[in-house]
Every structure is written in C-alpha cells, then in structure tokens.
Image (tube, grey):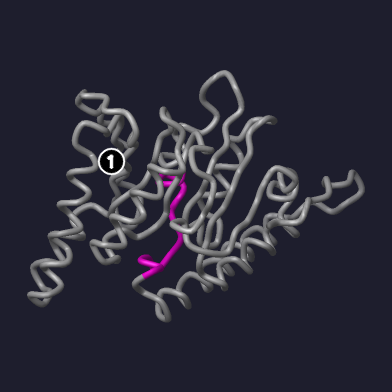
Amino acid sequence: MLERGRPLGANERVSTAGERIAGTLSDYRAFLTEFVRNYHTTGAIVPSGRALATALCRYVGQGRSGQRILEAGPGTGAVTSKLIDRMRADDELWLVESNASFVGCLRDSFEQRPNFRAVADRCRLVEGRLQDLDRAGQFDLIVSGLPLNNFSPEDVQRILQACSRLLRPTGVLSFYEYVFVRPAKMMVSTLEERKRLKAVGEILRDTLAGSEIDRELVWPNVPPACVHHVCLNEKWGQTPFLRFS
C-alpha cells in the first residue's frame, strides 16, 4: 500500500520546467532499461505519449458520483499523470504494477511530484499481478497499459477474466494495441510465435465482439495505437463509435 501522502505545503518549492524535463528523461531511461531486461512484460521502448494517455483516460471523471479507478501496468506513470489530472475530489485510484523498478519510480513520483502528492491520500500502489488482486466487483474503471500481445494466450485470458471479476457490472475496461504491430510480427516470426499471436488475436476479437462501446485511433503516438473501451460484464450489442486522435 502507498502510505498516506501529505498535502503540498504553501512554502514548498514547486517543480521547475527543468525538473519536470529531468523527471521525463529519467522515466525514459527506466523504460528503456526494463524494455531490454523484460521485453515480454514491458512491451514498449518509451512510455505512452500524451495523446494515447488522453484516449486511455477518456472515461475518467465521467458520471455523477465518484469513481474507483484501477490502473493495470502503470509503468513509470505516464498515463497515471493524465489520469490524476482528470480525477475528481471523490475519485479513488489503485495502481497495480508487477515490475519492482517501475514500482520504485511510482513511489518516487508520489513523494516528489506535486500533482502526484496532491492525490496520494486517495491512491493505493500494489506491487503484484492484476490476477492476484482480491477486490472483486469494486472498480468502475480499469485503465490497462499491459502489453497483451506480448503475453501467452493463457495469460491474456487470465488478465481479461481478472478485469471482468474486478469491474462492477457497468464498469469499463480501457486498453490499447499498437496498430499493425501484430500482423507485422506474424510476417517475420517463427511458426510457434505466429500461433501464439494468432491465438491472442482471437481472444481479443472475441472479447471485443458485442462488448466494445468506443474505439480510438491514436495516430500521433509512436507507434500509432488503437484504444478499446469495453464493458465486459454487459453485452451492449452495438457498433463501437470510432474516434481519431
């Protein structure tokens, strides 16, 4: 659990633009290091860009009452920062991250970054896997940065089942895939890898069918990404609304 954060005092020094840039560069170094060490669970060389973070947080801050939000795989906190900016005073945030290095980066952010410190008393940081979180039916929204196309079909199935278990009946899961990456990888991969990618693709297509309520193509991201917004526990039976960012 994250310890209760203290409010930013009036006489405390607010971070300068130079410090913010230094923090961003530090995040990039951490992400690149973990990409090299743990490609299968990191999945990207750099943190998510602003446009992708905005799309993933589309449903944060909506509705009349406060939301309990879960971010799965926050990494160094690129999406977390946008999520925090959209949170209302009665919203609560849980972060679940299995990478110890990224957990350390997040703890530093809650200690050092003003926007993180301002909401620290409403946030919980859990080091572990999403599948092991014992909070069934307690979340209104799950924002996922997990690289599903890097996992085995069995793990993808377990992660989606965990999301369904953790969400309230009308809760929404928002996750993304990089555009064209899976088909491109299938063209140059071994037979075994192609089988894995095909199976993951089939699981994701089955999940989206009848459950996807919104879709966003984020071209400015590197690489371009497609964000899916899904209501796993209710079949909406409608064609998703397609947005372009």
On screen, residue 80 versus residue 151, left or right, reads right
Q: Residue at x 52, y 21 (%)?
A: 63
Q: Is residue 113 left or right of residue 69?
A: right
45 is within the stretch colored magenta = yes
Q: Camera-side residue: 136 or 79? A: 136
Residue 195: within the magenta? no
Q: Is residue 113 above or below residue 234?
A: below
Quadrant of residue 90 within the rendered picture: top right
Q: Where's residue 242, x and y in %?
A: 25, 31
Which residue is situated farthest in the right direction here? Answer: 11
Please give the name of the residue rendered at 63% of the width and 34% of the height, measured from the top-left corner: 91
Q: Secondary structure at mark 1?
A: strand
Observer-nearest residue: 111 or 123?
A: 123
Q: Which x, y percent locates residue 85?
A: 61, 39
| Screen quadrant of the C terminus | top left
Instruction: Relative to 133, say whether 205 is above or below.
Output: above
x then y, percent, for residue 58: 44, 34
Magenta region: 41-53
> What amino acid is at disc 1?
Leu
Quarter the N terminus occupies:
bottom right
Name the outermost residue toward the bottom: 37
Q: Position of residue 4 (x, y in %)?
A: 78, 51
